[in-house]
Amino acid sequence: MRMETRTPLISRSDGNTYHLYLFSGPDPWHAKSGGIAAGRAASSYFYTSEQLGVDHGAVTVVFRTIDLDERGVEEAMRDAADQMAAILSSGCCLAHELYYDRGHLSVLRHK
């Protein structure tokens, strides 16, 4: 399920214990001032994990998009999904907000 048809079809599952899918994005990321933050985009993923007892988990991933074209942003979104799937597969929960920068997924730190 996607919020908009422009959202790429991205999903990951082991077919049994977890299911992860992209719900929306990429969308502009807004700074604390309310303006759009340059070089950033955000996507929302939903997941379930029988192993973790999560029926409906939500994760926002903020992507550093400087030097990425549209295809590069989609590749980053797919790579982030792969990394989140590995976390779920290992039996660990996902943080509610993550940051993706040049192949590295980490917990988003607010300044």
Image: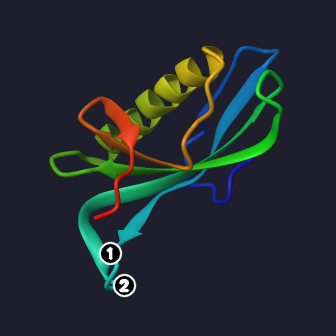
Of residues 26 and 94, which is closer to you in this image? 94
Image: 92 above or below 74: above
Image: 80 above or below 41: above
Q: Quadrant of residue 32?
A: bottom left
State the SS at label 1. Answer: loop
Mark 1 and mark 2: span between their CA atoms?
Answer: 5 Å
Residue contact between numbered discs 1 and 2, judged by CB atoms under 8 Å: yes
Q: Residue at x 63, y 16 (%)?
A: 89
Image: 41 above or below 100: below
Of residues 2 and 48, which is closer to you in this image? 48
Q: Position of residue 71 (x, y in %)?
A: 33, 40
Left or right of residue 29, residue 89 in this image: right
Left or right of residue 8, residue 21 in this image: right
- 10 Å neighbourhood of mark 1: few (<14), some, or many (≥20)? few
Q: Residue at x 18, y 51 (%)?
A: 66
Q: Position of residue 37 (x, y in %)?
A: 27, 70
The colouring scheme, among rainbow, by chain, secondary structure or one colour, is: rainbow
Q: Position of residue 28 (x, y in %)?
A: 39, 67
- What label does residue 34 carry, if any? 2
The amino acid on which the numbered mark 1 sits, given as a three-letter code, is Ala
Q: Residue at x 79, y 18 (%)?
A: 17
Q: Which residue is mark 1?
A: 31
* Quadrant in the picture for the C terminus: bottom left
Q: Position of residue 20 (x, y in %)?
A: 67, 33
The amino acid on which the numbered mark 2 sits, given as a three-letter code, is Gly
- 10 Å neighbourhood of mark 2: few (<14), some, or many (≥20)? few
State the SS at label 2. Answer: loop
